[in-house]
Image: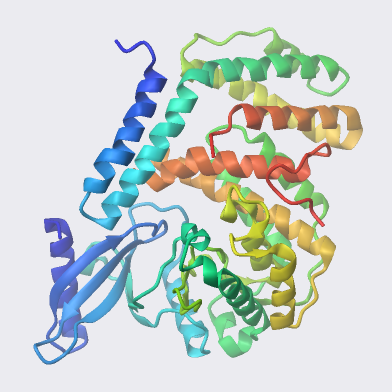
Amino acid sequence: MTPALTDLGNRLATYLSRVWEEPLVLSDIEQIPGGASRETYRVQLARGAEQAPRGVILRRDPVTSLIDTERALEFKTYEAVHRCGFPVPEPLLLEEDPAVLDRPFSLMAEITGCETATTNFAISPFAEVRDKLGELKWSLLGRLAAMDIEELGVHEFMPVPEHPAARELEYWSGVIRADALQPQPVAEAAIRWLEKRLPEPSGQLCLVHGDYRSGNFLYNAAGEIPAILDWEMAHIGDPLEDLAWSFDPLWAWPDKVLAGGLLQRKAAMAIWQRASNMEVDADAFRWWQVFASLKGLAIWISSTEDFAHGESKEPILAVAGWLMTDRHNRIVVDRLNPASRHQYSEPLQ
Amino acid sequence: MIPEPGKALAELAGKLALDVLPEVGSTYGMANAGLISLLMGALAEDFERAIANRFADIAELRDLFAQASAAPGATERAEFAASEPASLKLADVCTWHDEGMALLIELHRWAEQTDTAVDGEIWQFLYRHTERNCFAD
């Protein structure tokens, strides 16, 4: 533990002792890599000789992040889906007073014995349960798509869009135009393509996770998925949005065959359709696939701007600026070029 | 001075990944060292080619702009095609390149509506542009 980490952990333990009315002492704290939108820490708190330490995950607002999101909305989303039995870490507490830990934060219960890295899917013992993980991943997404937003209660704190596709396109085009440091001919061509082909609202609204991809769920060697993570971009929208995002070639790069490095797209789609009890409209899905790649570009362009002009110099922001922008530019050209050879993405169906 | 800075940068990226990273004590530190090594590798790739690639793009843009002389904005495109960067420093070459790309966006918008052949040429240019500037996977 570095002195800065120890100080953070001690301040958290003091705060929780007061809020939970239980004497807690910091026993360990480590920062978890990959929390691009929040600083994420695993914290162990000792509770006296008789009791096992309590593990919590601390998610603190960063100075700047990959994705500018509303922490209260994210926390309420965790509460809503957890209440309905959807696998997420149990949300414990949201503290918006920056006086406590310098910046607002939330706490989740720790889930142990799991992995998130997508590179494991190709190696033992995880390769043996890859199909099972794929089945679960898209079953859970189908289940989420089928959940009633009013039963979940998310309509009480999220806007209900009249035209989800139009709303998403307007938002992410705006991000690109506000944050781009250079002209973006590929993104602009994609925006025009999407504007011209805007699908009519399907009439099916669901809670969209917003970043449902390999890397954003916990899994283990038994082929279980105990939790879906990172709900900071959750919103009410079209069920196809998450499905298309989960299929984006970037999440299995450079493999273009297996969606998310787990399953053939056709198999994943069949699982999703079965679990959601919805049929995929091919034209609408094509639109959401192109949108997914544009949204990816928007996130990377925005991260580049954050790195160049913001306070944070996190390497992940710079990686987005060079490597991720490059890959998503190639994917978008691959998708839309009339003479495409489909080097990076499957042909749009 | 090391005559091949790109190569030196790549070697330092390798050193960071193979020698330094395993010695870092925390998972967070290892992840960041890995990312910085990855970035240094990408910068090493771009170091040698950046100016040449922007000139290659602009050579193609000049041809494209000449083909599309009937499209609105021909004067601005002709002026750009006749221009040169303020200097051969990367920042100046990038500013010049950005001017060309901004004109390309407007031409593409027009071509999509009006001229399928130019639209196809622009997509092929964008393909070559992204391939030229891509990083090793």
Picture coordinates of residue A265, whole percent (x, y):
71, 63
Judge left or right: residue B19 versus residue B38.
left
Nearer the observer, A66 or A342: A342
Picture coordinates of residue B46, whole percent (x, y):
49, 25
Nearer the observer, A95 or A225: A225
| Residue A233 sits above or below residue A83 on the image | above
Picture coordinates of residue A234, whole percent (x, y):
55, 70
Nearer the observer, B24 or B32: B24
Answer with the quarter of the image where residue A5 lies: bottom left
| Residue A286 sits above or below residue B87 on the image | below
Answer with the quarter of the image where residue B107 lies: top right
Judge left or right: residue B119 versus residue A99.
right
Judge left or right: residue B40 versus residue A135.
left
Residue A311 shows in the view: no
Q: Residue furthest left?
A: A49
Judge left or right: residue B54 versus residue A284.
left
Residue drawn where x is 73% and y is 81% of the image: A274
Quadrant in which the C terminus of chain A is drawn = bottom right
Residue drawn where x is 85% and y is 23% of the image: B71
Residue drawn where x is 45% and y is 83% of the image: A79
